[in-house]
Image (cartoon, rainbow, N blue to C red):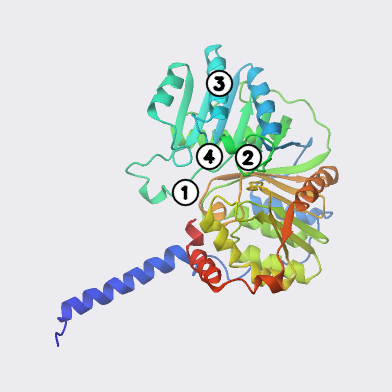
Amino acid sequence: MMILPVVEIFLLISGILGFGFWFLSFFTSLGRGPEKFNLRGRVSFKDESFLRALEATSRTTFEHGGLPQILNNGDGFFPALLNDIENAKKTIHITVFILRPHDPIGQQILSALLRKAQEGIEVRLLLDSTGSNTFYKANQLQLEEGGIKIVWFRPLRFGILTRYHRRNHCRAFIIDGKFGYTGGSAIGQEWTGDAQDKKHWRDVMFRVTGTQARAIQRVFNTLWTNACGEILTGEGVYPPIEEETTESKWISLTSSPVLETNLLRNVLWLSCMAAQKGIYIQNSYFFPSKYIRQVFIQKAQEGVDVVLIVPNINNDEKLVYYAGRYYYDRLLSAGVKIYEYQPTMIHSKNFLADDCWSILGSANMDVRSEELNEENVLCVLSESFGLKMRKEFNMDLEKCKEINLDLWRKRPWPEKILEWVCSLLGRQL
């Protein structure tokens, strides 16, 4: 029998230990953050203490302003965006994760931007080098020759290798600094139409004006400056804003991948803790962190109505789909209600609590959005807007199938094993 030399045994053990250390570091939450979150005292959306606590948690301050306009699916979003582009007078700024230049909607929007650039309008595009990887040099050269400024967020190059997986997932469309859009949509053919079939997704965008549009502009400006070094100024970027009615209180949050601060997670957790009646969530890539799972379970056990709408097998990211399902059992056991949207992929990213507190924007309810992506959300405290959001939620709920706990536990063992394996990879999906 051959006996391995001491050196080879040492190398073998070192390799096994090294692999184990790497696996635990990248694919588990060991050592990341506190064991659980606690709230000192109680909060509700009617108390000033909630506003002050959220300001401290989000590192920003509440402002007063109007209400976002809800734009359902591509049929609601793209005509409004194209109309604002057509009427632009000074600037057009867009950052989006996916822009497919060869899709018909991509061609239509790029043609509109090119026309405006040739009229002398300043057009800037900030594109994620991973999400928009079908954007070839020829496309870029043609647009830049036409006067459009294009900057890539974290292209693969030496110096950013350890940060390359941290992507820009923000949605920020701003025209003349006066009209802004955010939400879940990107620029590709699946976002067109009216969610009428599996090739056309369900999604929501929101059009804002005034101070809320300026907040969206700030999102773009921060990312643009960090990507290319240009600091934007002037009335085309920061136009005078007329005094607005105080229909709502709101904050704008930009979440960057810094584990120690994790603003998005903290805001979501505190928002759940303030809920007294109901938490209603639509999200496309559902793999919540342990803190969010804990607060879902706690609120459901307190009698708060916790309802989730997530994709069914139509999900385009199957690994995330199976990873999220790994947690269904413990959530359902606590009283959380889970519904899977049936007609097509649901890509909406909306949070509503007590029909008065809405969170909307680019963020998914997964660890990647919490810890690895640049994300932007708008948080709006308004009962009238919340009731509109609840109406949209209920309409989508009619197209869902509820997950029954007893039937869920009877699903085949291969599915359970697949869900467990995918959950181990969930932090990097």
Q: Which residue is mark 3?
A: 113
Residue 111 numbered mark, or none:
none
Camera-nearest label, 2 or 1: 2
Q: Quadrant of the N terminus?
A: bottom left
Residue behind mark 1: 166
What amino acid is at disc 1? Answer: Arg
Q: Is residue 319 above or below residue 10?
A: above
Q: Nearer the viewer, residue 23 or 291?
A: 23
How far apart in space, not on screen, are marks 3 and 4 (Cα)? 17 Å
- Per the model, the C-alpha gap separating discs 4 and 2 is 18 Å
Q: Please name the amino acid that badge 3 sits on.
A: Leu
Q: Are marks 2 and 3 in contact (CB under 8 Å)?
A: no
Q: State yes or no: discs 4 and 2 in contact (Cβ < 8 Å).
A: no
Residue 158: percent from the left, percent from the top?
32, 43
Residue 97: which disc?
4
Residue 62, relative to residue 321: is it above or below? Answer: above
Report the amino acid beneath label 4. Answer: Phe
Q: Are marks 2 and 1 in contact (CB under 8 Å)?
A: no
SS at circle 3: helix
Dot placed on the residue nearer the N-terminal end, 2 or 1: 1
Q: Which mark is residue 200?
A: 2
The secondary element bearing badge 2 is classed as: loop
Give the percent coordinates (x, y) of residue 230: 48, 28
If you read the primary sequence from the N terminus, does the residue marked by circle 4 or circle 2 appear first?
Answer: 4
Q: In the image, residue 423 lies at what x, y percent?
A: 52, 65
SS at mark 1? loop
Q: Earlier in the sequence, mark 4 or mark 1?
A: 4
- Mark 3 vs mark 1, foreground winner is 3
- Mark 3 or mark 1, earlier in chain: 3
Please tell me whether residue 419 is drawn above or below residue 170 in the rendered image: below
- Classed neighbour count for the residue bearing mark 3: other residues with Cα under 10 Å, few (<14), some (14–19), many (≥20): many
Instruction: Give me the C-alpha separation between circle 4 and circle 1.
Output: 12 Å
